[in-house]
Image (cartoon, rainbow, N blue to C red):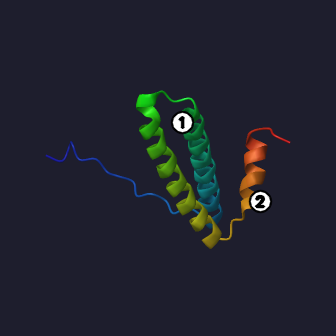
């Protein structure tokens, strides 16, 4: 009767440091998405201009939200830039 029952493991709470790292990664990913949307807009054909405008606005909103969250937990833009440069081998 209970053979098909699956036990779900509850998610383990992350440490504050892990949450900060995840937030920084989300900020960096959102920044890359915004940069890509801007590049695509610059080379878009007439039928896709509105689509890329929408993508740019959505990406900016997401990035603003994440940056606000980062500021609240004490993550500075310098910390994010340092990680970005390290992960992209710049500088």
Residue drawn at 61 percent across, 41 percent down = 35
Q: Camera-side residue: 37 or 82?
A: 37
Residue 4 position within the rendered picture, expressed as x and y whole percent measured from the top left:
21, 42
- Residue highlighted by disc 2: 78
- Residue highlighted by disc 1: 41
The residues bearing labels 1 and 2 have C-alpha atoms spaced at a distance of 28 Å
Q: Is residue 6 left or right of residue 25?
A: left
Q: Earlier in the sequence, mark 1 or mark 2?
A: 1
Q: What secondary structure is found at the residue carrying circle 2? A: helix
Q: Camera-side residue: 63 or 12?
A: 63
Residue drawn at 77 percent across, 59 percent down = 78
Q: Mark 1 vs mark 2: give the one in front.
A: 1
Residue 57: give its label. none
Residue 11 position within the rendered picture, expressed as x and y whole percent measured from the top left:
44, 57
Q: Camera-side residue: 11 or 34?
A: 34
Residue drawn at 62 percent across, 66 percent down = 16
Among the 4 quarters of the image, the one containing residue 15? bottom right
Pointer 1 local density, CA inside 10 Å: few below 14, some 14–19, many at least 20: some
Residue 2 position within the rendered picture, expressed as x and y whole percent measured from the top left:
18, 47
Q: Is residue 91 left or right of residue 37?
A: right
Q: Disc 1, disc 2: CB below 8 Å? A: no
Residue 71 position within the rendered picture, expressed as x and y whole percent measured from the top left:
64, 69
Q: What secondary structure is found at the residue carrying circle 1? A: helix
Residue drawn at 48 percent across, 43 percent down = 53
Residue 60 to residue 51: above or below? below
């Amino acid at each position: 009767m209970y053979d098909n029952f699956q036990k779900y493991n509850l998610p383990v709470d992350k440490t504050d440091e892990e949450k900060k790292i995840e937030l920084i990664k989300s900020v960096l990913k959102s920044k890359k998405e915004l940069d890509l949307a801007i590049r695509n807009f610059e080379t878009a054909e007439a039928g896709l201009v509105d689509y890329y405008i929408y993508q740019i606005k959505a990406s900016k909103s997401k990035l603003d939200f994440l940056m606000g969250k980062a500021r609240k937990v004490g993550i500075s833009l310098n910390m994010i830039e340092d990680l970005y440069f390290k992960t992209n081998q710049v500088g």
